[in-house]
Amino acid sequence: MNSDDVVLTTAEQELVEEIENGGRVVFAGAGREIRGRVLTRELLRTKEIRVRKLCMSDVRLTGEIDLEAGDVGFPVRLDRCTFNQPPVLEQANIAGLYLVECTLPGLRAAQVQVSTSLSLRHCTVSGRIDLMGAHVTGQLVLRGCHVDGRGGEAIKADGLHVDQDLICSDGFSADGQTRMIGAVIGGQFICEGAAFRNHGDKPTLELNGLVVKEHVFWREGFTVHGRVNLRGAQIEGSLDCHRAHFANPGDLALEAVGMHVHQVVKFSAGCRVDGEINLTGCRVGGWVDFTGGEFVNEGRKAVDLARASIAQNLIFQSGAVVKGKVLLAGADIGGSLWAQGGRFENETDTAIDATGMHVHRDVLLSEKTLGSVADTDGFLARGRVVLSDVRVGGNLDCAGGRFVNPQREAMIARGIAVTRDALLRNGFVAEGRVDLADATVGGSLDLTAARLGERGEALRCDRVAVGQSVSFVKVRAEGSVHMCNARIGADVSFAGAALMGSKTALELKGSVIGSTLRLKFAERPTGMLNFCRLRVATLDDRQSDWPDEAKLNNFVYSALRERSTDVTKRIAWLQRQPEYVPQVYQQLASVYSAAGQHHEAAKVLIAGEDQRRCERKSLPGRVHRTLWWILKPTVGYGYRPLWVLGWLAGLVVAGGVVFHLLGPGSFLSTRTEVPNTRFDPWLYTIDLLLPVVSLKHSDLWVPLGVAKLWSLFFTLIGWVLAICLVTGVGHLFKRDR
């Protein structure tokens, strides 16, 4: 019996004696029972005894251990002990507490102050662990423990302050809600292999406002069933979730709005999330890596990084699979967006929405290359990819990428601004429309060997501004290609391209191309070409490049590539056009004329006049056409005035022969006083054919009979040729003015 007249059992008496001896106390209970009030009294005798450490094992502790607001001046370790009531440590000051393989119905330790560490290793807790406002100077260790909150809270630790590490690992599990709102962890937060479950409506992990001074390791089998809340969390190291599993299908799995991570974030290497990751407005000082992770929230948002700020790279490389929407709207990425080989699937909606995103370096939605060898799995998006108003400080590289959204938009990049090159080439496939309207590309726009679209519209890049060249070399477009009102600094090439739009194959209306427009298609386009108001420096084409129908109103080009299509074939093609456009003929003629090919220029202009006459269908038009019909063979509508000399020469010869055969007997001389005047049939013909200029020879002879008819004929022909010459030359001067 002690001083308090409490009858002690044999085991309790042994414990008291060991404690009174001081030093390091080791007590083996061998399954015996110690009452809680006895142990409480001994633990609070700090001033009366000099115990360095108390170690107890295999003890059954009955009744309440109540250390509330008390001081325990030495560390306590309990191995394989069983509690029948939750220990009460509220507002207590304890040097250290270590529970190993213990069983207890809960732990009440709100506002406890632990000078060293608080450790529960491989313990079974069938109730709540309450650490509200607790302060642990050393580590808080929950290795291998199982905490069953009985349908409520498993761990309640709002305002917890741990100066060193918080460790929940080695198979730790918690059934019920874990709350650590506003907690501060001075070291690392390690949950390797831990499992958290909550079957209620509340979040499984409620960690809003969490502050971690070093790293957070939620990896290597870390599992959460239900929602994780990390709103406003501050992590001064890295957040590492590789090989973790977050499961809350159809709802938020991880909400970290406004989270700030000073180093890197990893959801990689086997991480799986069933539900949504919401990282809206988060700030990351390093990179964010989703490579090797699987993120599933089909038909909804899977990864939300809207307005996020990432100092380095955002990575979704080979092995990353997202089934649901990735939202990057308004995000700021200080490095590159690497998505080579990533798979993004949201077939009923948008796979990636990056509207207004700013990437300071490259955007890589392509196949991954190792040295010079390409990965067999290139970038794949099933669903719409939206890059509208995105700013890219380097290259936009979609080489080898596949964008699948049949009968809808596969890629929308309206207003995108790319500082260097936009590369949609070498295996780039778009099963759906690609929209690059209003895009700005500082370097080149390269679609070499790309496959575009379906029947209908394949590519729209109206009003694009490209500083260098645009390449459609070997491109295959199932639908129409539109590049209206574009401004291209250098060449545009369609060499080897196959354009199969059913109605319109290619539309370049209103565009300006600073250098060469190179057609040279692999096959004749199946639809119309619309080059209205197109301006190019040089046109490089072949006859086979032109379909039967093209709109060429105000198509202006300064030169034709040498050894291009023969002028006769060009004229034949122009004449097949459905309507006559004077400018088309005049433009081609001006190019030939500027190159010194005046003969070819005249051919084109004459062909244009032919076409213009054919267009006149009304009665006045027919009369006009008939009157002008004679201008073509005589003066070539004024473009060949010297043809008149040929006609004159031929008529002089013909007239001379006719009048020679008729002989002088068919003429009566008007100069009887000069009976020996000689008749010259050729001089007589020339005098008849020149209506204005008189050689006086025709005045000396009066034709008789048949000669009179022939004289009248040659006189009329002379007047006709004179009128044709005057009319044609006048028309020529009028055109020149």
Image: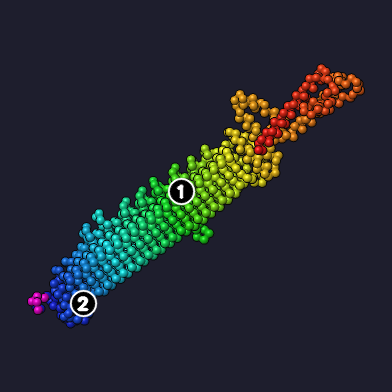
Residue 549 in the image: state x and y as whole percent.
Answer: 57, 36
The magenta segment is 3-8
Residue type marked 2 = Gly
Q: Quadrant of residue 581?
A: top right
| Res. 77 in view | no
For marks 2 and 1, give the CA distance: 70 Å
Considering depth in this image, is 237 or 654 the residue closer to the camera? Answer: 654
Q: Residues within 10 Å of mark 2 (few under 14, many from 20)?
A: many
Residue 662 in the image: state x and y as whole percent.
Answer: 84, 21
Examine the rendered structure and indicate whether residue 312 appears above or below residue 600: below
Give the secondary structure at mark 2. Answer: loop
- Say which of marks 2 and 1 sits in front: 1
Q: Quadrant of residue 66?
A: bottom left
The residue under the point 45% across, 60% down is 335
| Res. 512 in view | yes
The residue under the point 23% across, 61% down is 154
Residue 647 in the image: state x and y as whole percent.
Answer: 76, 30
Considering depth in this image, is 78 or 135 the residue closer to the camera? Answer: 135
Examine the rendered structure and indicate whether residue 605 appears above or below residue 381: above
Q: Residue furthest front?
A: 673
Residue type marked 1 = Arg
Residue at mark 2: 73
Image quadrant for the N terminus?
bottom left
Image quadrant for the C terminus?
top right
The residue under the point 62% across, 43% down is 542
Q: Quadrant of residue 499?
A: top right
Q: Which mark is residue 414?
A: 1
